[in-house]
Amino acid sequence: MAPDSRFIERIRGAMGRFREARILVVGDIMLDQFVWGEVSRISPEAPVPVVEVERETMLLGGAANVANNLRALGASCGLAGLIGSDSHGRTVLDLAGRQGIDTRCLVQDERPTTLKTRIVARGQQVVRVDRESRAFLPPDRAERLNRLMDEVISEVDAVVVSDYQKGVVSEPVMEGLRQACARRAVPILVDPKPENSRLYKGVTLITPNNREAELMSGLRIDTDHQVEEAAELLGRDLGAKGILITRGPKGMTLWQQDKGIFSIPTAAREVFDVTGAGDTVISAVALGLVAGLAMCEAAWLANLAAGIVVAKVGTATVSVSEIEKVLEERRELLPDGVGSRTGGEWC
């Protein structure tokens, strides 16, 4: 069957409303440093390559990359979390300002700003060096962050929690966020870390990858049946409305509280770098929901966006025009009106 033209028009209509969306991103803010160079010899000191540096770039990473993705798709975005009172923290503020990201909810602390340095030679990552603190926020910092978020929740359409387990996503922060969002009927979407599963109870949508879903559910995931079982178990245990498991070359699996399981085939043709792919997924699905798509439609949109971003090197983003191009050129990726779930409409 031919792709459902109604679906294509709904996706296009939603993307046209992205500029009206207002999203608050809460989580672990990082700075991604890329050191680009060439390797022509092995060190005489140890059997390791010598990288001759040609250039360096600084990019927003972690939760800040989610904000960057949202801005690249046209949405208004605020960023809530912790940065250090250091030069890297100032760089985060500078880069966020250039992207038009609202930084009213950033709290500064004595701890260093998380910095991830990736050394890349001939298009391949040679090594990554992390400088960070994983301690939970001190009580006074968590209280200040909650106050700042409470002041802006009424201005946003959705909250995205980007958890990299660096200390921002904690019990007091999540409890304050749940209460503030419940008062204003604002959905919460979470890109999780398995160790913090207990913190995500009652949120709208959780987007683990395959390994994270295994650790969170306690189930081994090798087959379609196993991933469906894990998604349903997680959804019911956490009281979420949806669980979207990203499975790399196997696409995505979505469980919805009211509609059950749907499978979405991968949109990726080539995979050069998965850095930040999860950030793109949760950004696209959040905007899809805010723009009026059903959860399964928003998941399909996120799948298209992820297929684009993994073909890029580095902490990348995707644009509406790039998604439009995929809609035009790769109709085989689109649902045919029956879809991937036997016995009913796909969405």
Image (cartoon, rainbow, N blue to C red):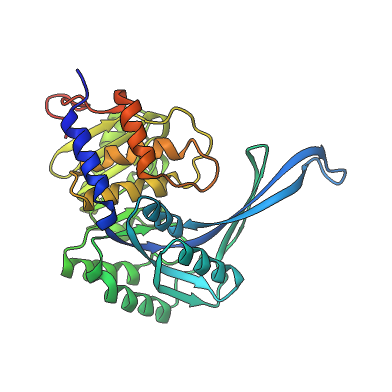
Which of the 4 image quarters holds residue 26? bottom left
Which of the 4 image quarters holds residue 305? top left
Q: Nearer the viewer, residue 11 or 276?
A: 11
Q: Residue furthest top?
A: 1
Q: Is residue 144 above or below residue 9?
A: below
Q: Position of residue 119 (x, y in %)?
A: 66, 48
How many discs mark residues in the rendered view? Answer: 0
Quarter that holds the C terminus = top left
* Camera sees residue 288: yes
Q: Is residue 101 above or below residue 197?
A: below
Q: Is residue 118 above or below residue 157?
A: above
Q: Residue furthest right?
A: 44
Q: Residue furthest bottom?
A: 140
Q: Residue at x 51, y 39 (%)?
A: 312
* Camera sees residue 297: no
Q: Position of residue 225 (x, y in %)?
A: 28, 29
Relative to residue 127, is residue 68 drawn left or right? left
Relative to residue 243, is residue 49 drawn left or right? right
Relative to residue 55, is residue 314 drawn left or right? left
Q: Residue at x 47, y 64 (%)?
A: 96
Quarter that holds the N terminus = top left
Q: Nearer the viewer, residue 314 or 196?
A: 314
Q: Residue at x 22, y 26 (%)?
A: 340
Q: Residue at x 39, y 45 (%)?
A: 319
Q: Nearer the viewer, residue 77 or 177?
A: 77
Q: Position of residue 195 (x, y in %)?
A: 41, 55
Q: Position of residue 279 (x, y in %)?
A: 41, 50
